[in-house]
Image (cartoon, rainbow, N blue to C red):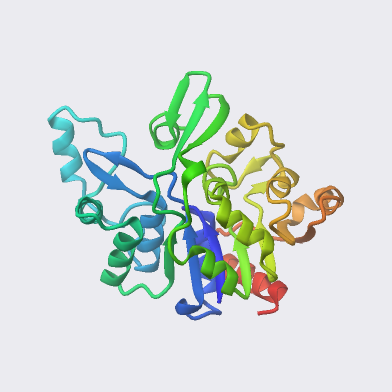
Amino acid sequence: MITVLSGGTGSLKLIQGLLNFMKPEEVTLIVNTADDFEWQGLYISPDIDTAIYLLAGLLDENRFWGIKDDTFHFLSMMKRYGYPDWFSIGDRDLATHLHRTILLKKGYTLSDATNSLCKAFNIRVKILPMSNDKVTTFVKTDKGKFHFQEFWVKRKGEDKVLGVIFEGIEKAKPAPGVVESIKKSEGIIIGPSNPVTSIGPILGVSQIKKALERVNVKRICISPIIGGGPVSGPAGNLLRGIGVEVSPFGVASIYQGIIDEIFIDASDQAFTERIEGLGINVFCTNIVMRMEEDKVNLAKLVMERMKI
């Protein structure tokens, strides 16, 4: 069994590759929930939903969020009534958020709601929210402080980042099964997700980080940064905002102490010596997953390096 720390895009592409070599029951995803927020009275959990839709074969992989071929009649009517429409919820997507919200209002946990959704789609990969406690990512910018979704979706991530806050992280406890999955794993993967706002909150839960520090198995990270910029998303702006070098070395420095090896792109071989100075092994290869073949090849290399 392997455990993957996941955000919403890069890590999930790697999962698609890994499932060519492993049974779904052998894979556990620990998913970021600090991007969660309430929208029009509904509880939205973007990274969990993306994982569910991907594994259910429903994901719109062109945008890598939402359901493919969804319609947006609900959103257009809400706009007519004067509500903001910057966060796009499709009509079938709406049912997911409504179901989760109903369960949470009845007293069920986020883990319970996630399990219910996974059962509905017969998903056999174990998807675990990082915590059932409320953790919220806020981005401090030169234009003010914004919830991560507002910073990234509404404002397009264009504001200069001055800092990142995970509100509630100090009190957050791991969701049931999270620490246990780490302890029982034959290998740990930190996927190529945003190290600041996707993986950062997971590691911010102290019991999760301690478990990763102590586990005696191979721990591999795939860099989401190539050269001086991210493969996708706002990671570059966010890394600069927290004072971390935007490079594979910067990523490695964040994960120092909880990874044994980092995969970096072949074009970034020049960073090898500096990264190895952190006590982290380096493996150079193509890490860009544009095609299905890229996902499979990268996953195969990860499995070989883990000797699984």
Residue 272 position, x and y percent, is 83, 53
Residue 162 position, x and y percent, is 58, 25
Front-lying residue, 173 or 258: 173
Q: Quadrant of the N terminus?
A: bottom right
Residue 120, relative to residue 110: is it above or below? below
Residue 136, relative to residue 190: is it above or below? above
Q: Which residue lies furthest to the front in this view?
A: 171
| Residue 125 in the figure: left or right of residue 203 | left
- For the question of whether residue 264 can be seen, the reply is yes
Residue at 82% x, 55% y: name it: 279
Residue 152 position, x and y percent, is 45, 35
Res 50 → quadrant = bottom left
- For the question of whether residue 291 can be seen, the reply is no
Residue 120, relative to residue 138: is it above or below? below
| Residue 296 in the figure: left or right of residue 86 | right
Residue at 84% x, 54% y: name it: 276
Q: Quadrant of the C terminus?
A: bottom right
Res 212 → quadrant = bottom right
Residue 266 position, x and y percent, is 75, 56
Res 99 → quadrant = bottom left
Front-lying residue, 204 or 40: 204
Residue at 51% x, 61% y: name it: 13
Q: How many marks?
A: 0
